[in-house]
Image (cartoon, grey):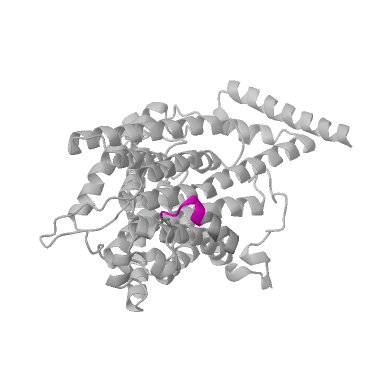
């Protein structure tokens, strides 16, 4: 039995290494190789390849899910200590409630438009997802992922879109109202936008390009964050009587930058995983992801240095995230030059966007709209500018700067405006409804005291300020 397992492992490795060798030499690039070679594999080789695809996407989904820890760290670090537990709870529930409702309702809106609440052809399916028990893809040559792996990966994306809002509404939101928002975006709002492109809807027919979600994920979350901050209103101490912004420092820059690094690592599931199979395009996409992050952080640092006279740590961190957001759309169509340019501009833009939003008297404590909404829209436009037939992943598109004219840029602009308009209206109505029900904003007393105790019953941090002696401790132990 052990010998047979070793033979299977050797066969799998041989198939993978053989495919990798051909991929490196094949003039059509990784994408053409994946489409060509799979049709020529025998049954055993195809099985090994499909297993590898599904395990890779499973690992990518775990990395995307781990990004929730990064979001939680960033948002907690950039906000006050008295609200840190509240931030953790919101991120925890974005995953938990979000995945449940995406599975029950959102998945089928995104990818079929029918089969809502688990009904397929009049029969009840498993948890709203037809084929959840199928361990092998129905048509592996057409789409290599089994339903449970595919669902897990997409559900992690839905949770990521939802949790972007958490930091923008921090410090003054009722937890039960936030839960209603999280359900609304994962069950309905985000899945509708997904259907437009990844579900084969009208944006897909238009020619709109969004490889990993600059618009579909990040603009949805970013514009939802904007509407939440507007409907909710600013924190009590954020603006003076003349409307000038006051600085409310976050309680832990190290925590926030730790979150940035966690998100950076998680993005290696977000972008390479969006290839949806394990081929030789994956390492190229990973390298471009790293270059965009580096360029974004550098752009944020330099611009903050010029504008604020100091290289601001928070702006550099947000610059890295902005670069990662912006590259999601066109990463399969870019050369390294286009990648670096896109990330660099995103890092510069985010500094100005954060200051501009604050100048409008909109209180977004972590810059969620600027990082995800503004940089996401820039990423869509960048695809229309920098897409090149020189990309080894997808060489089918040419942007404006590579002789392709305005066609792709126009499609990207239309898609971005449509996503922004839909999210502004839908999430605006959602937040207004929650506010009308008296479930959106906490009382003045609760806001001043912090939400950790009033909403959850305990602070994030406790300090033992007693000055007990060793003898006191010994006495307590002996009498307890």
Could you say where residue 394 lies in the image, as x and y percent from the top left?
49, 34
Could you say where residue 251 lies in the image, as x and y percent from the top left?
33, 50
Q: Is residue 54 left or right of residue 376?
A: right
- Rendering quarter of residue 220: bottom left
Quadrant into which the N terminus falls:
top right
- Rendering quarter of residue 30: top right
Query: Is residue 244 in view from this perspective?
Result: yes
Hey, which residue is sitting farthest bottom in the picture?
Answer: 437
Q: Nearer the viewer, residue 399 or 445?
A: 445
> Does residue 45 show up magenta in the picture?
no
Q: Is residue 243 left or right of residue 102?
A: left
Hey, which residue is sitting farthest top in the picture?
Answer: 25
Query: Is residue 404 in view from this perspective?
Result: no
Q: Nearer the viewer, residue 166 or 102?
A: 166
What residue appears at the point 32 percent right and 51 percent down from the top-left corner?
Answer: 366
Tell me which segment is drawn in magenta: 467-472
Could you say where residue 383 lies in the image, as x and y percent from the top left?
37, 39
What residue appears at the point 72 percent right and 58 percent down from the top-left corner?
Answer: 133
Q: Is residue 274 left or right of residue 351?
A: right
Q: Nearer the viewer, residue 413 or 456?
A: 456
Hey, which residue is sitting farthest right in the picture?
Answer: 1
Could you say where residue 139 lies in the image, as x and y percent from the top left?
69, 48
> Does residue 469 show up magenta in the picture?
yes
- Rendering quarter of residue 296: top left
Q: Is residue 313 left or right of residue 278?
A: left
Task: Count how many numbered circles sit on residues in the image.
Answer: 0
Quadrant into which the C terminus falls:
bottom right
What residue appears at the point 49 percent right and 39 percent down from the top-left corner?
Answer: 265
């Amino acid at each position: 039995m052990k010998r047979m397992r070793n033979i299977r492992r050797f066969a799998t490795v041989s198939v993978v290494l053989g495919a990798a060798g051909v991929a490196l030499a094949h003039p059509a690039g990784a994408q053409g190789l994946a489409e060509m070679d799979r049709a020529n594999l025998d049954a055993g080789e195809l099985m090994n390849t499909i297993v590898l695809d599904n395990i890779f996407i499973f690992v990518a989904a775990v990395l995307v899910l781990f990004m929730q820890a990064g979001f939680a760290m960033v948002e907690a670090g950039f906000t006050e200590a008295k609200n840190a537990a509240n931030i953790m709870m919101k991120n925890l529930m974005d995953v938990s409630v979000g995945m449940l409702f995406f599975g029950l309702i959102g998945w089928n809106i995104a990818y079929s438009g029918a089969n809502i609440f688990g009904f397929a052809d009049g029969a009840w399916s498993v948890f709203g997802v037809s084929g959840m028990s199928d361990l092998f893809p129905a048509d592996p040559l057409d789409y290599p992922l089994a339903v449970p792996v595919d669902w897990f990966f997409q559900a992690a994306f839905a949770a990521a879109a939802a949790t972007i809002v958490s930091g923008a509404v921090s410090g003054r939101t009722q937890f039960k109202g936030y839960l209603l928002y999280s359900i609304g975006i994962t069950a309905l709002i985000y899945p509708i936008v997904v259907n437009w492109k990844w579900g084969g809807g009208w944006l897909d027919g238009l020619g709109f390009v969004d490889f990993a979600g600059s618009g579909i994920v990040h603009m949805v979350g970013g514009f939802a964050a904007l509407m939440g901050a507007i409907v909710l209103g600013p924190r009590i101490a954020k603006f003076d009587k003349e409307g000038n912004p006051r600085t409310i420092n976050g309680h832990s820059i190290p925590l926030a930058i730790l979150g940035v690094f966690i998100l950076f690592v998680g993005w290696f599931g977000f972008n390479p995983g969006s290839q949806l199979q394990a081929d030789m395009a994956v390492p190229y996409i990973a390298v471009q992801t790293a270059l965009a992050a580096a360029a974004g952080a550098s752009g944020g640092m330099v611009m903050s240095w010029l504008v604020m006279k100091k290289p601001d740590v928070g702006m550099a961190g947000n610059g890295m995230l902005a670069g990662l957001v912006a590259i999601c759309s066109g990463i399969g169509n870019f050369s390294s030059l286009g990648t670096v340019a896109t990330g660099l501009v995103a890092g510069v833009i985010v500094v100005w966007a954060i200051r501009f939003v604050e100048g409008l008297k909109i209180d977004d404590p972590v810059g969620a709209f600027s990082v995800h909404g503004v940089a996401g829209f820039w990423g869509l436009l960048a695809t229309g500018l920098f897409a090149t037939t020189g990309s080894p992943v997808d060489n089918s598109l040419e942007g404006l700067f590579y002789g392709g004219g305005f066609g792709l840029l126009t499609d990207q602009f239309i898609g971005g405006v449509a996503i922004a308009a839909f999210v502004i209206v839908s999430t605006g109505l959602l937040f207004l409804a929650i506010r009308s029900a008296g479930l959106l904003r906490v009382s003045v007393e609760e806001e001043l005291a912090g939400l950790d105790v009033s909403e959850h019953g305990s602070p994030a941090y406790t300090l033992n300020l007693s000055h007990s002696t060793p003898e006191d401790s010994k006495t307590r132990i002996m009498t307890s």
